[in-house]
Image (cartoon, helix red, strand yellow):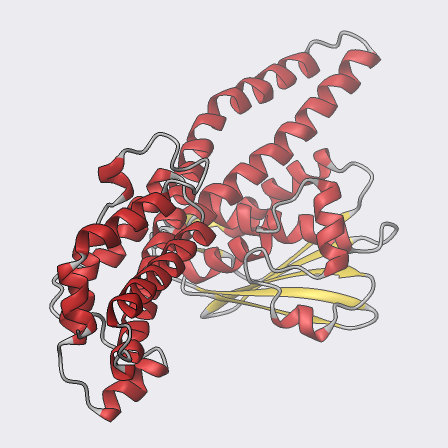
Amino acid sequence: MRLADFILRDMGPILAQWEAFAATLLPASTDMGSAELREEAEQMLRAVTADLRTPQTPEEQHEKSLGQGSGLVGETESAARTHGTLRARAGFTVNQVAAEYRALRASVLRLWMDDCAPGAPNLDDIVRFNEAIDQALAESVTSFNAQIEQNHNLLLGMLGHDMRSPLQAIQVTSTYLAALNAGEQVSKAAGRLMRSGARMQALLNDLTAFNRTKLGLGINVMPTHVNLADVLAEELDELRAIHPDREIELHVTGDLEGVWDSQRLQQLLGNLVLNAIKYGAQDRPVRVMVTGDVTHVRIDVSNCGSAIEPAALARIFDPLERGRDRQNQDERAGSLGLGLYIASEIAKAHHGAIETRSDETETTFSVSLPRAEP
């Protein structure tokens, strides 16, 4: 008997074995009933049989072997994709999903070969069946990962939203304590609260911005007519208050009037300066140079210190991509490793660009922003 006919005839026993194996995938399957454990399995097997019965040219078989197949035949919405999404929502791991397909493959082939005995099974059916199962697995894992990514993004969005109220309470309370003049100990405690609140606010801003980019929304900007010299000076004053032991210089040249999102550019500058403070020489100043010409404004943030390795420099604006030394230092400092990525995205949102250069004497991040008419 050909494999497609066998699958349709023995659909019940095959699904029973699928369900029995899926029930062993704990803890995800603990609260799942028979219908949930068999979710989409019958539709998937029917799609496999349709694929087995569809003629296939050598060229199409070669494309499938390279993972470039067009999917299972006759499906308006892949049962495998739906299966992956539902398994992600049920709490399965990707390894458990892959194990389901391994078990399905083994069960079908073993039952079919037993049915064929003493005759020999059709080898072409075996090849075609493995291709179809591999295609279904690929589709299922793709939808599984997409669902997990969506869950992560939603979690980040809710976390960022829910953190704002308690963080604002911390910042307001620390400001109030600092203004009381209630003695040196209270002032020091208020200062620590203010610094911790500022770090938390920076982390939250980066987390929220990163979440928007992962959702495909990009960095939201609200440009207004501003004097960039005043905007950046205000941000640096706050950074000096948070890091009183570090020297931060500001040098301004040219006309800095233009149309930009002032809060986003403060976030950009803050991320670059904090990066320079973290990785630069502790006894040397961080220098911020802002230059305006006819068409653009340029912001250069420089620090002295060891050079960044070329391999790390090539990935420096990628999210969560850090060299080993930088990663260890970021973890000790409570950093998400998103600051430079967010700075790059803010520059892009203003139709600008950011680049970096580094040698044994100095590392400089340069931002170029086009000047817009108000």
Q: Residue, x 32% and y 73% (percent of image)? A: 130
The answer to whether 91 appears left or right of 36 in the picture is right
Asked which quadrant contains residue 306, the reply is: bottom right
Percent across and percent down for residue 256 are: 51, 57
The answer to whether 283 appears left or right of 158 in the picture is right
Q: Is residue 259 visible?
A: no
Q: Is residue 129 above or below residue 245?
A: below
Percent across and percent down for residue 12 are: 19, 50
Q: Residue, x 55% and y 51% (percent of image)? A: 268
Q: Is residue 178 above or below residue 118?
A: above
Percent across and percent down for residue 227 are: 49, 49
Q: Is residue 155 above or below residue 227?
A: above
The quadrant of the image that shows the C terminus is: bottom left
Q: Is residue 259 above or below residue 354?
A: above
The answer to whether 41 appears left or right of 152 in the picture is left
Percent across and percent down for residue 22 are: 36, 45
Return the residue nearer the eye: 194 or 326: 326
Q: Residue, x 83% and y 39% (percent of image)? A: 245
